[in-house]
Image (cartoon, coloured by chain):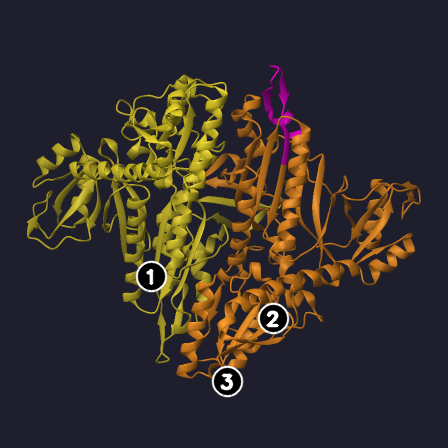
Chain colours: A orange, B yellow
Amino acid sequence: MDFAKRDLPKKSKNLSEWYNKVILLAELADYGPAKGTMIYRPYGFAIWELVQKEMDKLIKDKGVKNAYFPLFIPESLLKKEETHVEGFSPELAVVTMGGGEELKEKLIVRPTSETIMYDAYARWIHSWRDLPLAINQWNNVVRWEKRTYLFLRTTEFLWQEGHTAHANHDEAWEMVLWAINMYSKVYRELFALPGYIGRKSEAEKFAGADVTLSYESMMPEGKALQSSTAHDLGQNFSKTFDIKFQNQDSGSEYVWQTCWGFSTRSIGGLIMAHGDDAGLRLPPRLAPIQAVVLPVKPEEKILKAVNEIAGVLKKSGIRAEADVSDNETLGFKINKWELKGVPLRVEIGEKEIKNGSATLVRRDTGEKIVVNIDELTAKSGAVLESIQNNLLEEAERFLKANTRSADNYSAFKKIISGDRGFVSAFWCENAECEKKIKEETKATTRCLPLDLSEENGKCVYCEKPAKHRWLFAQAY
Amino acid sequence: MDFAKRDLPKKSKNLSEWYNKVILLAELADYGPAKGTMIYRPYGFAIWELVQKEMDKLIKDKGVKNAYFPLFIPESLLKKEETHVEGFSPELAVVTMGGGEELKEKLIVRPTSETIMYDAYARWIHSWRDLPLAINQWNNVVRWEKRTYLFLRTTEFLWQEGHTAHANHDEAWEMVLWAINMYSKVYRELFALPGYIGRKSEAEKFAGADVTLSYESMMPEGKALQSSTAHDLGQNFSKTFDIKFQNQDSGSEYVWQTCWGFSTRSIGGLIMAHGDDAGLRLPPRLAPIQAVVLPVKPEEKILKAVNEIAGVLKKSGIRAEADVSDNETLGFKINKWELKGVPLRVEIGEKEIKNGSATLVRRDTGEKIVVNIDELTAKSGAVLESIQNNLLEEAERFLKANTRSADNYSAFKKIISGDRGFVSAFWCENAECEKKIKEETKATTRCLPLDLSEENGKCVYCEKPAKHRWLFAQAY
C-alpha cells in the first residue's frame, strides 16, 4: 500500500498527472506488460460490475439477448465493408501464427464485431418472423493506440456492443434512440454525469453508419468526452453481407440495422469528473464500498462496535466495510478511504459509544453528521442518496457553466483558447469549415443536440447560411 | 428455423453426429468463420449466464474478488516458467502485427493467465497483510486446437480462472480443495452431473503445478470428460516471478499459490450426458426456459389463456414462455421444444379451459400430469424440482454402472474394448506403465479418487506392488 506517501498531485494543478496517480494509488487499475494495455484491479473492476448489473437488466428488458461471438475475425470478412475497414485498419492487431504454424489467412483480433456478427445474421435471418433480431455481447475488443491513457484510451478495453436487425427503418431508428437514451439514463443516474445527446457530423460518425448519435460529457479543464454512441447503420451492412428477409407479402428485403456500445472508458470519465485534490469521489450507486466504518482508537470495545455497525449496515443493503487493521493510524485511514472515494465514512470512538451515536462524514462535502445509532441505517441511506444527487447537481452546474455560445469566429477562438468547454455555434455543415476549425483551434464538432429546432444563422467560420447550432469542443 | 426437418440422428445410433446436430438445431451455438471457433448463440449463452450467476456468488462468498487482466501476454513473460510454456507452446495464437507495423516483441493471446497475473502479484504483494490475495476473472482464452468439437474443444473458449496467493501451504491446499468441491457442488446441483474428484498423475497434471485435482464425469459410450481442475502450484511460479512477502517475523518468503478453472466445456458435458433421441434435456436449474406454455388449438380464447398462464408462471419465479406463433402446428411446436430441452411443457386446450386445469408434460419422462389451475405454480415448481433430481439420479446410476474394477490387464482390456467407462485398477505410478496402457488401449489415468485409502495391490500392467486403485478411461 502506497497511501502513506500521499504523493497525489493536486487535481487543480496537474489534471493529467493527478488522473494517472489517483488510479494507481486507489488501486483501480495498473499498467499491463504489453504496451497500451491495462489491468482492471478488483476495486476498479467492481465499478464495471455494478454498471454491468444495472445495464444488463435494461438491455434484457428491451428484449435484447446476450450472446458471444468469436474474438478472431478472418481478414477477408473484415474487409467486406469498405468504409468500415478503412476506419479501423490503422488500429488492428493481427494474429499471423497459430499452433506453431503460419496461418494461411490472417486473423484480426476484433476491434468491434459488426462483420463477424452480420455474417451469421445472414445465415440466421430468413423471414419477418425472425425479426427483430437483437443481440448484445459483453466482451473485450482491441484497437491499437499510439498514445494511451488508463481507462480513456487503451489497446484493449471492455464494453458491451448491441447489434439489432429490423424489418423497417422506423423500428431501427426507435432502437437507436432507445440505446442513446438508455446510456444517458445510466450516465445520469449511476455515473452522476450529465451530457448532451446529439448527432455526429459526417466526418466524425462511425465507419459504416448512416447516422451516429453520441452522448458527450464535459471534463475538468474544458475537454469533452464522447461517452457512448449508437449507430443507425441503415442497409449498409445488410447489402454487403446479404442479410435479406421475406416480408409479409413474400417479397425479399434487406434488413435495417443498428449497433451501440458503452465501454470502460466511462469509468475514466467518472474518475476525472468527480475527483478532487484528496482523491476519488465515487457516486454511491457505483461505489464498490459505499460506507467504511473506522475506529477512532484501536480499543477492543470500539473495534467490536465498528464490526457490529459494519454488519448492521451491510444487512440493510449498504455496501459497507469495517477497517479494523491495527497498523494504520486514524489519520492514515481517513486519507486512504478519501483517496479511494468511499462516499460515506462512519467514525466510532468512545464518545459515540457513550452517547449511542455514530459520526457520519460525507466524502463530497466533508460535512459531519452525528446520528443516533438507532437511525444509523436510515440516515446512512439518506445521506448516500443525497451524495448521489449532489454529485449530479455539481456536474450539471459545471456542464452549464462550460457551455457557451459564440456568434463569430473570434469569440469562438477566445473561448477555446481560454476556459474551453463546449462552444455552441452555427456551422454550415460543410466539411471544409469543420476541418479548418479543427486545424486552427483543435476543437472538433461534438454533436448536433437532438432537441434543437432549425434557426436562420450563419456559419461561425465561413459565414454562409447555417441552420443549426452545433456543439464544438476539444476532446479526449 | 430448421426444426421442421427433424433431421436429428438418433443419439443411441450416432452420438457424435447427434451431438453436433442437436447443438445447431437447438440454436445453442454455431460455427465461427475462423477455424475451430464457435458462436455462443443466445440460447446457449443463457445457460452459461445461469452458471456464472450461481458460481460468481460462491466465489465472492469465499472472499475471492473479480478483476480483469490483459488478453495479450508478451512472449518473454510467458516463457519465464519453463514447464508452463512447454505445456502450452504447441497451442499458442500469436499477434505479430499491431497498428500496421510489425511488433518488436510478439504478443501471445492468453491461453491462461498465470504469467501475466503473477507478474503483477509480484508488484502488489509486499507483506503478510497483503495475503491471501485471491482474484478471479471471467474471460476468453485461446488454445490452438487441431481437432475441434463444439463446446468440448474449441480454439477460443470462455471460462473463469481463479488465482490465489497464500502465506503458507496449508492455506493454499485448503483453497484447492474448496475450489474442486465448489465445482463438484455446481456440477451436481446445477448440471445434475455426478463425477469423481481425484488427483491427476504426474503425466496428466497441469504444466507448472505440484498437484492437480480434477472432476471427472462420464459421458455416453463410456468416455470420460475432465470437467474442471484445481491446481496446487506450490512455490513454482512464486520463485520464477519473485513473489515474496515479509512474514510476521520480518523474514522474507515466497508465496504459495493455487489456480482453478471452469469453462464452457461444461455445457458440452451437459448436452451429451442428458440428451436423448428427441433432443436436449436441460436440468431445470440451467434451463433458460423452464416451462413453455402451448395452445392445443390456435383459438383466441385459448391463446389468451396461454399468455395469462405464462405470465402467472413468470410471476412465480419460473422462467416461462408462451408459444403462440400462428405458423406452426401443435406437433411441430412439441417437437421443437423437446429438441430445445425445455424441462416442462404446459398444454392448454378447450378441455383444460372447461375444467379449470392445465396439462403438464415432463421432458425427462414424458409423464403427463393434469393439475388444477389454482395449484399450477406450486405443482410446476415441484415438478421442476423432481426433474432436476431425476436427471441427477439417472446420471448417478449411469456413473455407477460404468465404473468397473479390473484386477488384471486382460480384464482391463476387455472392459475398455467393450462398454468402456471408468476402470478402477491398481497402478504402480510408474509413468512407463501409464504410457504403455495408453498406447495399447487409448485409456489414460483419469484420477486417483481423493477418498481412497491405501491398499496392498499389484499394478494392473507390470504387476509390481501398487498402493492405490486409479481410475482409467478413454477421454474426450
Left or right: residue A401 versus residue B293 is: right
Image quadrant in which you'd find residue A121: top right
Chain holding disc 2: A
Q: In the depicted view, which residue is nearer to us: B178 or B325? A: B325
Relative image position of residue A455 (x, y in whole percent): 88, 42
Q: Of the residues under marks 2 and 3, which one precedes in the sequence?
A: 3
Left or right: residue A35 versus residue B388 is: right
What number is the disc on residue A351?
3
Q: Is the same chain shared between marks 2 and 3?
A: yes
Q: Nearer the viewer, mark 1 or mark 3?
A: 3
| Amino acid type, mark 2 | Arg
Q: Nearer the viewer, mark 1 or mark 2?
A: 2
Residue carrying label 1: B236
Q: Nearer the viewer, mark 2 or mark 3?
A: 3
Relative image position of residue B224 (x, y in whole percent): 25, 38
Q: In the depicted view, which residue is nearer to us: B57 or B322? A: B322
Left or right: residue A8 versus residue B169 is: right
The answer to whether B46 is drawn above or below residue A146 in the figure is above
Mark 3 is surrounded, within 10 Å at the Cα level, by few (under 14), some (14 to 19) or many (20 or more) other residues, namely few
What number is the disc on residue B169?
none
Q: Are marks 2 and 3 in contact (CB under 8 Å)?
A: no
Q: Which element type, helix, strand or loop, lies under badge 1?
A: helix
Q: Which element type, helix, strand or loop, lies under badge 2?
A: loop
Chain holding disc 1: B
The answer to whether A447 is drawn above or below residue B236 in the figure is above
Image quadrant in which you'd find residue B23: top left
- Was residue B440 drawn as part of the magenta stretch in this picture? no
Q: Which residues are magenta?
A: A235-258
Q: In the depicted view, which residue is nearer to us: A160 or A363? A: A363
Residue carrying label 2: A363
Q: Is the same chain shared between marks 1 and 3?
A: no
